[in-house]
């Protein structure tokens, strides 16, 4: 800025305005000679009166002082613009604790309102499903436990298909040599028999869960259904074993020809490989029954009711977790902003202190120019009087006095009103910054307590349920 002072070999000066040039004035007026001329033509006069020559000196210096004040007035406008710019920048960048609290409160309300708006439509269905679940538990005397079922049905059924594949490979090995189609025929027969074995075993295990039902009728259905299917599976294994034995002797035999030996002598098998085939098949059966038992919760129907409620409840919990996550992020961001405030305050303090230092330097230079002008006037008048005394004689009282610089036609005083107002403005802002810095950590602690309490109010489960309950209640009133 053009108003700032600069340092030169001649000292601290303004950029575009110089000190009063007393040497030039001495050359111009030659006051010592003029004083001698005055004394040679005039008798000794009152030393307290200025002569015409001396008034001319002061008139010229007053003109300089007037130009100095015009320069100071012009630069005061620039200084005030600079002060307003710096203070405006500080006010724009500076975040107060009250602003930060309002910021947290507004953002918290937005997050909370968004969560309530999202859950308002789902709340009634979630409560209905929870009541349905509780009623099912009560009616079936189930303790308040979670339903146990596979977390991933894809993985669960994948194991069932693995059992089918393993048994298909085993059966293809045993049927490969006996089948008229060779290995391809063995694979086909193995896959068909394995599929029926694993499927029926899984279904039988699933039906066996009804033994846990509170109703005796459904208990009996569970046991009878399981026994019936298990007998079918055993017959299936015997049929496969008999079919394999007959197939080894007669590759072209029809499948219906196996029924006669199966019905007459079901356990009569001659080949050890047939017994191994049955044993491995039954092992796969047991694994499949176990998988069927765990296909859903051990109590029939409980898994279905529980999953319907859990799907809605998980969506609610997910929304609540998201709201909490956003709230915690907001909390952390607010604390981070409060930490950054001290740095901003320090920067603001430095900016104001630097500006204050520059203004002080300007005022000191400004008043220094005026003092220099007064000293120049004193120098001119002293030389003038010394020249007159040389003529009057040394004993005359016609000598210089500072009283000559005052009174009518004397030197003008320097007007620093605008500069003083600028300094007052800077001092006021600095005091405000100093006060904020002094009370910063106490105010930061209070802010943390306030926003922490607000965060807990929004994140508290009871508060969330209460808000949603009131929303539901108000909606019912409107309906």
Image: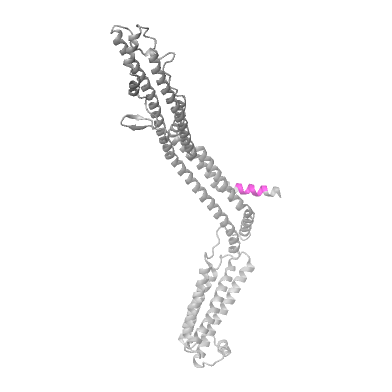
What residue is rendered at 47% in x and 89% in y? 177
- In the image shown, does 267 or 291 lie closer to the viewer? 291
Q: Quadrant of residue 394?
A: top left
Q: Residue at x 45, y 26 (%)?
A: 70
134 versus 440 height, above or below: below
Q: Is residue 229 visible?
A: yes
Q: Is residue 279 above or below residue 77?
A: below
In the image, residue 331 lies in the stretch drawn in magenta: no
Magenta-tinted stretch: 466-474
Going by the picture, which residue comes out furthest to the right?
Answer: 479
Between residue 423 and residue 145, name the one nearer to us.
423
Tell me: 277 left or right of 389: right
- Determine whether, in the image, residue 316 is placed left or right of residue 77: right
Q: Is residue 469 magenta?
A: yes
Q: Which residue is at the front of the view, 372 or 451? A: 372
Decide if residue 268 is in sight here: no
Up-down relation of residue 257 to residue 344 (above or below): below
């Amino acid at each position: 800025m053009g108003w700032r002072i600069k340092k030169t070999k001649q000292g601290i000066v303004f950029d575009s305005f110089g000190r009063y040039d007393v040497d030039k004035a001495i050359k111009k007026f030659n006051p010592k000679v003029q004083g001698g001329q005055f004394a040679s033509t005039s008798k000794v006069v009152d030393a307290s009166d200025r002569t015409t020559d001396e008034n001319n000196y002061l008139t010229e210096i007053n003109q300089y002082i007037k130009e100095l004040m015009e320069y100071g007035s012009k630069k005061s406008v620039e200084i005030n613009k600079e002060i307003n710019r710096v203070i405006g920048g500080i006010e724009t960048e500076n975040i107060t604790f009250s602003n930060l609290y309002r910021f947290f409160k507004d953002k918290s309300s937005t997050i909370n309102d968004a969560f309530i708006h999202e859950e308002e439509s789902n709340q009634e269905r979630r409560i209905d499903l929870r009541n349905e679940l509780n009623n099912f538990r009560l009616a079936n005397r189930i303790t308040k436990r979670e339903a146990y079922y596979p977390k991933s049905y894809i993985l669960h059924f994948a194991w069932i298909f693995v059992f089918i594949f393993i048994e298909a490979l085993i059966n293809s090995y045993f049927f490969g040599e006996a089948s008229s189609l060779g290995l391809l025929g063995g694979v086909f027969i193995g896959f068909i028999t394995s599929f029926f074995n694993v499927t029926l075993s899984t279904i039988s295990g699933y039906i066996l869960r009804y033994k846990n039902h509170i109703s005796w009728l459904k208990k009996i259905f569970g046991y009878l259904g399981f026994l019936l299917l298990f007998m079918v599976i055993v017959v299936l294994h015997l049929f496969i074993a008999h079919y394999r034995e007959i197939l080894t002797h007669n590759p072209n035999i029809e499948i219906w020809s196996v029924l006669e030996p199966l019905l007459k002598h079901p356990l009569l098998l001659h080949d050890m490989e047939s017994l191994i085939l049955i044993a491995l098949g039954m092992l796969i059966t047991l694994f499949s029954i176990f998988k069927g038992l765990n296909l859903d919760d051990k109590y029939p129907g409980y898994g279905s009711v529980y999953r319907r409620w859990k799907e809605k409840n998980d969506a609610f919990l997910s929304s609540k977790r998201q709201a909490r996550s956003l709230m915690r992020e907001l909390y952390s961001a607010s604390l981070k902003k409060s930490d950054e405030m001290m740095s901003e305050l320090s920067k603001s303090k430095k900016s104001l202190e630097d500006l204050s230092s520059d203004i002080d330097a300007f005022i000191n230079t400004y008043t220094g120019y005026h003092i220099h002008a007064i000293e120049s006037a004193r120098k001119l008048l002293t030389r003038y009087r010394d020249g007159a005394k040389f003529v009057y004689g040394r004993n005359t009282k016609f000598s210089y006095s500072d009283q000559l610089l005052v009174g009518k036609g004397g030197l003008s005083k320097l007007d620093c009103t605008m500069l003083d107002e600028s300094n007052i403005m800077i001092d006021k802002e600095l005091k405000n910054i100093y006060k904020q810095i002094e009370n910063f950590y106490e105010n930061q602690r209070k802010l943390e307590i306030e926003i922490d309490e607000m965060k807990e109010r929004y994140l508290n489960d009871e508060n969330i349920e209460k808000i949603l309950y009131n929303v539901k209640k108000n909606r019912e009133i409107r309906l």
